């Protein structure tokens, strides 16, 4: 389920409904101040689950950001799930204020998927790449170039929801899932790329260019 038709990701509907009910109950039983507080919380939840329409760039040979957030780390790291070799790893931290719908960084087929039910360390820490709960996808494009995208649950995030499965063919910028309430996405780049961003830079899923194929 791609959530294409909704401005709010469907995973957020139940949280918004609960917030709306609490707003009404708070208003009638505790007073207008309580109702206003719960309304503001409900609006914040709706913003977290926002699901904007985005048209990816039509440029060739680009790798787009899979997540909204900030580049918190960029390093050489050993990718041990699929590639079994060191690659340039770009880590994107998503705060609770970012849109959390993730998108495919390249047009590719999901060649393999690995789920790891780990811990919930703070997502911006380096050890989160190995220890936290995560879902890793091996993406292979039409030229057999391989990229690994890892959705990592953080201290607040407790659930990774995927819209796609092993064997699916993805378009550039296609919605692939959501991580609820603060998290991180790692991208292990193909070897034949040049990086276009810097640590500390803010990026948008399906819009910002992380790297280019050379």
Image (spheres, rainbow, N blue to C red):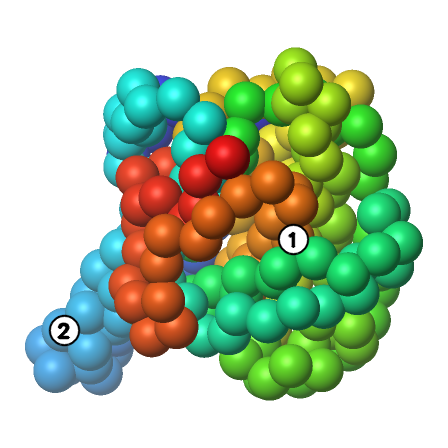
Camera-side residue of 44 and 195: 195
Residue 24 appears left or right of 186:
left
Distance between the Cα atoms at labels 2 and 1? 44 Å
Camera-side residue of 102 and 194: 194
Q: Categorize mark 2 by other alpha carbons within 10 Å: few (<14), some (14-19), many (20+).
A: some
Does residue 14 lie above or below 134 as drawn?
A: above
Label disc, if present, on residue 134 of the rendered structure: none
Label disc, if present, on residue 188 of the rendered structure: 1
Q: Secondary structure at mark 1?
A: strand
- In this rendering, does residue 206 appear at all? yes
Residue 132 place in picture, x, y as percent: 74, 73
Residue 85 appears left or right of 65:
right
- At horizontal 61% and vertical 32% (from top left) the residue drawn is 163
Residue 97 place in picture, x, y as percent: 30, 67
Q: Earlier in the sequence, mark 2 or mark 1?
A: 2
Camera-side residue of 148 and 61: 61
Give the labeled residue for mark 2: 36
- The quarter of the picture where residue 108 lies is top right
Q: Quadrant of the N terminus?
A: top right
Camera-side residue of 83 and 124: 83
Residue 200 place in picture, x, y as percent: 33, 74
Does residue 203 lie above or below 172 as drawn?
A: below
- At horizontal 61% and vertical 61% (from top left) the residue drawn is 89
- At horizontal 47% and vertical 48% (from top left) the residue drawn is 194
In the displayed image of the protein, which residue is found farthest to the left? 32
């Amino acid at each position: 389920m791609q959530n294409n038709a909704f401005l709010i990701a469907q995973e957020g509907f139940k949280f918004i409904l609960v917030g709306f009910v609490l707003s009404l109950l708070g208003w009638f039983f505790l007073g207008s101040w309580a109702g206003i507080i719960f309304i503001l919380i409900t609006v914040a939840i709706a913003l977290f689950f926002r699901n904007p329409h985005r048209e990816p760039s039509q440029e060739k040979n680009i790798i787009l950001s899979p997540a909204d957030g900030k580049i918190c780390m960029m390093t050489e790291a050993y990718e041990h799930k699929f590639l079994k070799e060191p690659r340039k790893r770009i880590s994107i931290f998503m705060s609770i204020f970012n849109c959390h719908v993730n998108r495919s960084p390249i047009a590719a087929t999901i060649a393999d998927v690995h789920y790891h039910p780990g811990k919930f360390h703070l997502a911006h820490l380096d050890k989160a790449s190995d220890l936290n709960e995560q879902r890793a996808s091996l993406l292979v494009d039409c030229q057999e170039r391989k990229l690994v995208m890892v959705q990592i649950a953080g201290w607040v995030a407790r659930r990774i929801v995927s819209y796609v499965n092993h064997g699916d063919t993805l378009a550039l910028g296609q919605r692939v899932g959501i991580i609820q309430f603060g998290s991180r996405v790692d991208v292990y780049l193909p070897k034949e790329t040049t990086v276009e961003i810097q640590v500390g830079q803010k990026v948008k899923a399906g819009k910002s260019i992380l790297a280019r194929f050379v």
